[in-house]
Amino acid sequence: MFSLRSISVNVEDESAWVESGATLGEVYYRVAEQSKIHGFPAGVCPTVGVGGHLSGAGYGNMMRKYGLSVDNILDAQIVDVNGRLLDRESMGEDLFWAIRGGGGASFGVIVSWKIKLVPVPEIVTVFRVERTLEQGATDIVHQWQYVADTIHEDLFIRVVVMQSNKKGHQTVKAKFVALFLGNAEKLHALMDESLPQLGLKHEDYIEMSWIESVLYWSNYPIGTSTDVLLERQPSSEKFLKKKSDYIQEPMSKSGLEELWKKMMELRKPVLTFNPYGGKMREISELETPFPHRAGNVYKIQYSVNWKEEGVEAADKNLDLIRRLYEFMTPYVSKSPRCSYLNYRDVDLGTNGNGNASYSEASVWGTKYFKGNFDRLVQVKTAVDPGNFFSYEQSIPSLTAWEGKMAE
């Protein structure tokens, strides 16, 4: 799929056809090339591929304004198990529903997507500030939990929390990163009203174009040419593991303090808190396979990276992230403990040889999809009864399972 990467932007009808092998960075670049007042709500990592990102739902820093990537898809082209090339009309609404967040790899080969461009202002505002425990991080994160999902939908404030060593002193630091679809003056007023604890100064607010904010969120220095978005190879860590959770009730200060202790003990894992609310609250959880909508305050991404080769290093790092995930059990969503499909997490269970029963697959299926898992199974059974398209956590076909049992 990597070479299927053409992007055709149509500013007149505010859409684009994007092949699955393109990267998000290439999409943003091509949109901005045509228009200063359009963007697309998708991930903040430019080297992520379009195909996997969109088929697994896709989110980014405009989700509170415009929802997920899949909430902005108009059409798609998929090759089904019989080798037919189908568009939205010929595949039907059930399959079109399933591939917008149910994971494409269970249903066919998605060749391209028609996305809906969204309006962005000519000037947006960003900030990025860090606070350690000594600088009041606990109080600020605690308060952030109460405003991040209810604040104006044009504002997205992500928090990245990590263990830190300063001059031999161990602490935890929280980095607050924001995108505001408006000017600095408006953002300043919003922040003073809703999160004065952060203590932002006039110079913390930086105005720029939307495409420049894409670079800023990717940690490129201000002034970097947007051409870097065309680089398709990530310069990231060699090995990584991610997990996810949903917070539905803000954590108490004492809960946060316990979490900081745990992070200082484990040292390596990093947590990223992504706020919900806004548009995410308005869209029904049945609208797409992605069900994590109203009722979620923020999502947690767990992350650990390492460079050392070999099983021992992998096991050590996986153990660290699993221990942090285990620690968080009392604080996160329950029955099911929800997860985000695009951080595919085999810790939740796998189907082994690719033919899982409905009850086996529902163990992880309900964590990713809640009640939508049943509809995904129905679509799968209809379009790929023989389970030709399968992987460790693919949607099971009831026909294939019954056939296997009959054998």
Image (cartoon, rainbow, N blue to C red):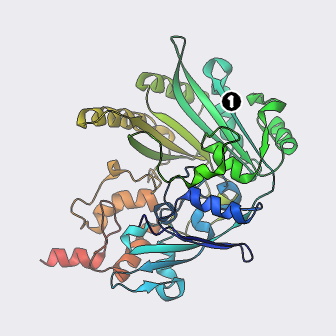
- With 381 as the anchor, is 69 left or right in this view? right
Instruction: Give the percent coordinates (x, y) of residue 254.
Output: 57, 26
**Left or right of 218 in this view: 400:** left
Q: Residue at x 39, y 41 (%)?
A: 240
Any part of residue 296 in sight:
no
Give me the residue at 44% from left, 66% from top.
3
Please name the amino acid that badge 1 sits on: Ile
Looking at the picture, how far across and down is residue 319, in whole percent? Answer: 33, 34
Element at label 1: helix
Circle count: 1
Q: Residues within 10 Å of mark 1 (few under 14, many from 20)?
A: some
Q: Nearer the viewer, residue 140 or 5?
A: 5
**Quadrant for the N terminus in the image:** bottom left
**Considering the image in quadrants, where does the C terminus appear?**
bottom left
Q: Residue at x 26, y 60 (%)?
A: 351
- At 41% from the left edge and 36% from the top edge, which residue is drawn? 305
Give the camera-side residue of 139 and 175: 175
Image location (x, y in percent) of residue 50: 51, 63
Q: Is residue 322 above or below residue 72?
A: above
Q: Quadrant of residue 385?
A: bottom left
Residue on which disc 1 sits: 140
Q: Is 275 positioned to the left or the right of 119 in the image? A: left
Q: Is residue 154 left or right of residue 160?
A: right
